[in-house]
Amino acid sequence: QEPGMLMSEDQSLEFLTDLGYAQIFLTKNF
């Protein structure tokens, strides 16, 4: 197991929401 790959659920959730917002902004711009 590599320490870099391990994330807490809060961190992964925050990452996913950031990813979702980024996709929304990208689709709105194009």
Image: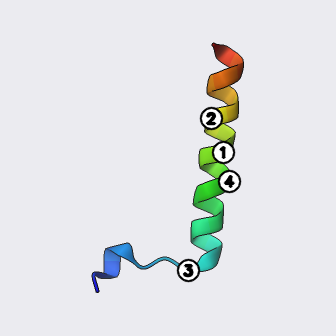
User: How many angstroms separate mark 2 from mark 4 (CA)?
Assistant: 10 Å
Q: Mark 2 highlights which residue?
A: 23
Q: Nearer the viewer, mark 3 or mark 2?
A: 2
Residue type of the residue flagged with mark 3: Ser
The crowd level at tag 1 (other Cα within 10 Å; few <14, some 14-19, many 20+) is: few
Residue at 42% in and 79% down: 6
Residue type of the residue flagged with mark 2: Gln
Name the N-terminal-most of marks 3 and 4: 3
Residue type of the residue flagged with mark 1: Gly
Residue at 64% in and 62% down: 14
In this rendering, the answer to whether 20 lies above or below 14 is above
* Residue furthest to the left: 2
User: How many angstroms separate mark 1 from mark 3 (CA)?
Assistant: 18 Å
Q: Mark 4 highlights which residue?
A: 17
Name the N-terminal-most of marks 2 and 4: 4
Name the N-terminal-most of marks 1 and 3: 3
Q: Quadrant of residue 15?
A: bottom right
**Marks 1 and 2 close (CB-CB < 8 Å):** yes
User: How many angstroms separate mark 1 from mark 2 (CA)?
Assistant: 5 Å
Q: Mark 3 highlights which residue?
A: 8
Residue at 29% in and 86% down: 1
Q: Horizontal and vertical percent for residue 26?
A: 62, 25
Q: Mark 1 highlights which residue?
A: 20
In this rendering, the answer to whether 25 lies above or below 28 is below
